[in-house]
Amino acid sequence: MKNVIFKKTLFSLLLLLSFVGFSQSLPLSKEAKISVITCGLGNETYSYFGHNAIRVADPGNNIDVVYNYGAFDFRTQNFVAKFAKGDLDYFAVVSSFSDFINDYNYEKRSVFEQELIIPQDLKQKLFDNLNTSLLPENRSYTYKFIDKNCTSMVVNVINTSLGENVIVKKGETDITYRSILFPYFDGHFYDQLGTSIIFGTKVDQLGTKIFLPFELKNSLEKITYQNHSLVDKTKTLLSFKKETPGSWWNNVYTYLFILGFVVLAHNKIVDKIYLLIVSLIGLFFVLMGFYSFHQELAMNYNVLLFNPLLLILIFLSIIKNKRWTYRFAVLHLLFLIVYGIFMINKAHFFIVLPMIITSGFVLVRVAIRNKKRIPIII
């Protein structure tokens, strides 16, 4: 979804400067075509979902450029902290179409083009708005995973230029954002697991907004404008079969092996290490929920499984307070039951189910070890 510009040619830099300075008043010729570009999925984290951009091709003015709203700079000071907090600046850039297509050809990612069928005056308005978005005061924006990304920015600039919300989501508005996202992690198991447990309630809302590139592509094929299709027939500019990466460790089998070891080891130290890891993950979730501006990380009910209060249980166990260790173990078993019931209709239920079972085994063992036998007085 987020297209990182690693290499900018001298031509692209000069192109950006010239567009900011002069293209506001440049009239498009009648040969001009404006298209929505959709790029295929990649195997880097930022490319799992694909990418959208807008192409302006005007042979009459010797223009063939791509406007891209998904750029960010790895050299930004405190990059990781800013990205996690949700105040990292993303920005609009323009590059030659040849540079753009060569990058995706090198990455072996498919590229599709959908030409907008709109009047000349609206093409001009869209072209002017695209160039306005390159101005220093306009080019930066704060990225939001669902609400403001390379896809939503493309949708917004087109709808603004058309003067109405022509581009809206078509199809799959009755399933959650979480369900929509889940299949995109094919071949990246731990990314799928990580995003499943770090996202909170926002991604469980119905996915009524266009927020992914191929949602936009599929919706454009169904949208009409002024009694005709909004876009021409989709053209395939590059075609590659996505290769699903193989990994000896990044798969469900290592996940099940580790959890199976915890269950079968039946060892106090192993149980404590497992509970410590789970509780620290939960503590991280809680801190991120307060620290980050990403609404997707707030209200994370997965802390019922990854519960920071397990740290208290571990402490009580270490100081050998059997009564309260038992009580806390039972309390966390109740949390686990509530979590399991709540999760039944969630998209990530089956991916966390092995952890629910493992945690259940561990907590039951802790409870049994610390349950005091109550003498019966006759």
Image (cartoon, rainbow, N blue to C red):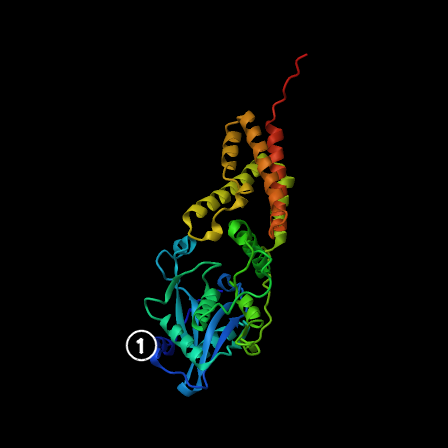
- Residue 66 found in image quarter: bottom left
* Residue 2 in view here: no
Q: Position of residue 48 (x, y in %)?
A: 53, 63
* Residue 93 place in picture, x, y as percent: 39, 71
Residue type pointed to by label 1: Gly
Q: Quadrant of residue 243?
A: bottom right
Please identify the residue farthest to the right as the structure is shown: 378
Instruction: Work out whether residue 248 or residue 300 is closer to the camera in this orientation and state it.
Output: 300
Residue 82, relative to residue 322: is it above or below?
below
Q: Nearer the viewer, residue 292 or 165?
A: 165
* Rendered-image quadrant of the C terminus: top right
Could you say where residue 270 lies in the image, as x and y percent from the top left? 57, 39
From this view, report whether residue 91 is shown above or below residue 179.
below
Q: Residue furthest bottom?
A: 60
Quarter of the image holding residue 156? Answer: bottom left
Q: Nearer the viewer, residue 42 or 253?
A: 42
Specify the farthest residue to the front: 227
Q: Is residue 57 above or below residue 80?
A: below
Indicate the secondary structure of the residue bearing disc 1.
helix
Vertical order, 197 against 18 (above or below): above
**Disc 1 target residue:** 21
Structural crowding at the residue carrying mark 1, measured as other residues with C-alpha within 10 Å and reported as few (<14), some (14–19) or many (≥20): few
* Residue depicted at 52% across the width and 71% down the height: 38
Q: Residue at x 55, y 67 (%)?
A: 214
User: Where residue 76 sits: x, y (%)?
Assistant: 36, 60
Q: Is residue 206 visible?
A: yes
